[in-house]
Image: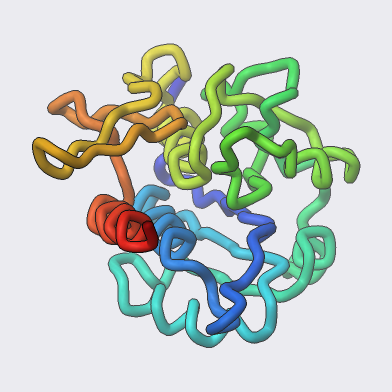
Amino acid sequence: MAAKADKGFKYIIEHMEEDDAATRALPEWVRLEYAHMLQLVGPASSVCFTSLSASSVPPLEAYLKSKAEGDKAVLATEPVLRFLEAQNPPIPQARVCLLDPRAEAAIAPEDADAFDVFLYGGILGDDPPRDRTGELRRLGFAGRHLGPVQMTTDTALGVTKMVVEDGVPLDKIPFTDFPTITFNKYESIEMPFRYVQDGAGQPILPPGMKEHLKADLNRTIDDF
């Protein structure tokens, strides 16, 4: 199957996380994942974040624009169906694929011809999973799964890109499950998700995520 790197896709994240109660903006780990998504998609593709709160849009827009590939971000307060209808021309639901852990078929390179949009209920990285995708499943989108192990949303998007834009079959992508992130000989944390491996066999995390996890771990220790 030929790669579709020359075709631009829309990757839509239907935002489902609550804003930070104090700042009315998005939590730092969400921002890191969202910025990472912009770096993962192909040069002609975009990442659209829908159902954002009005208060979160200005700070998120400023944050993403300051990052690599920030011009690939589209921010919207409308839910996904209204967002699709508002495009010029409107995007029919038949051209949208929902990444759904309960779908019968796995994502495949051939889906690059069948769909123009790939939709995620994000952030998906709940442990244990809460089936937030069920809210989108009820809207009637065609679905594809990414395998049996829970992924973070940026990983799910990156895997989809590798399959539909690069033409890599899902079973040829190197994964690492539940990796342990080591900070020093005393501190480490196990991540309860599947990640893509880099060339050194390490999980591909968003830039800045390891530092954020370390700081979060230190805050947790300080609370005791």
Q: Position of residue 54 (x, y in %)?
A: 68, 84
Please determine whether, in this image, residue 137 is positioned above or below residue 82.
above
Q: Would residue 123 appear left or right of 140 to someone viewing this image?
A: left
Residue 75 sits in which quadrant?
A: bottom right
Q: Would residue 193 appear left or right of 144 to someone viewing this image?
A: left
- The residue positioned 32% from the left and 55% from the top of the image is 221
Its colouring scheme is rainbow
Residue 115 sits in which quadrant?
A: top right
Q: Position of residue 129 (x, y in %)?
A: 65, 34
Please determine whether, in this image, residue 210 is positioned above or below residue 140.
below
Q: Is residue 67 visible?
A: yes
Q: Is residue 110 visible?
A: no
Along the line of sight, which residue is nearer the eye, 76 or 54?
54
Q: Position of residue 194 (x, y in %)?
A: 43, 28
Q: Position of residue 133 (x, y in %)?
A: 74, 41
Along the line of sight, which residue is nearer the eye, 114 or 24?
24
- The residue positioned 40% from the left and 41% from the top of the image is 5
Quadrant position of the C terminus in the picture: bottom left
